[in-house]
Image (cartoon, rainbow, N blue to C red):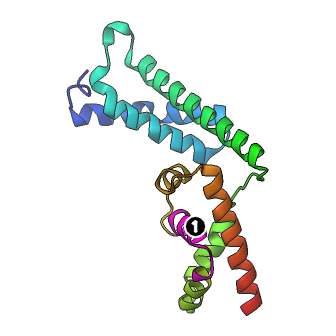
Amino acid sequence: MAAARGEQAAFEAFYRRWLPQVVGFHLRRVGVPEVAFDLTAETFAAVVSGCGRFDPERGPAAGWLFAIAEHKLADSLRRARVESSARTRLGLERVILEDADLARVDDLASLADRERLMLLLGELSAEQQAAISARVLDERPYEAIARELSCSEAVVRQRVHRGLRRLRKRLEETA
């Protein structure tokens, strides 16, 4: 109740108390730490924005918190199904960027010949440039990029994947 009244220390205590359990809740269900952490962040963001609506007469704060976590999980799973369906309809393969892919781009960015990388990036389509810049350089989530570019997450993932593949090929050709 103190957190609902805007007492920051109370919210911090609530957050510290329940963070490990919410991360565990999401991790057991999705099995991917990065996704679990994202869902946990979304859960607590919803708690912050909605704590004024918490009603202790309807049950304990923990029950309210985990109901929010369940809703965030369900939303995420629904988005994944929609993305999968769209990908299937469009005949696109699922694109999974590994840490090694992102590390290669980071390595390239640290090269003395950064100008060369920028020239090669300039050879890509405007859509691929925007997607790579937002995802790899700015480290923004696919969902936010898709909203900004008015397309689906699957399209953004494909643009990043194809753009990075083309960059890798051009770098090998000019090495």
Give left or right: position of 11 versus 127.
left
Q: Where, quadrant-wise, is the N terminus in this rendering? A: top left
The vertical placement of 169 against 56, above or below, is: below
Relative image position of residue 150 (x, y in whole percent): 51, 52
The vertical placement of 89 against 72, above or below, is: below
Amino acid type of the residue that numbered disc 1 sits on in the rendered structure: Glu
Q: Which residue is mark 1?
A: 127
Q: Where, quadrant-wise, is the C terminus in this rendering? A: bottom right
Residue nearest the observer in this picture, 34 or 120: 120
Q: Name the secondary structure under disc 1.
A: helix
Give left or right: position of 110 versus 47.
right
Residue nearest the observer in this picture, 150 or 32: 150
- Highlighted magenta segment, given as a residue range: 122-136
Relative image position of residue 138 (x, y in whole percent): 48, 66
Residue nearest the observer in this picture, 53 or 133: 133
Quarter occupied by residue 100: bottom right
Q: Residue at x 65, y 51 (%)?
A: 154
Residue nearest the observer in this picture, 65 or 80: 80
Disc 1 packing (10 Å; few <14; some 14–19; many ≥20): some
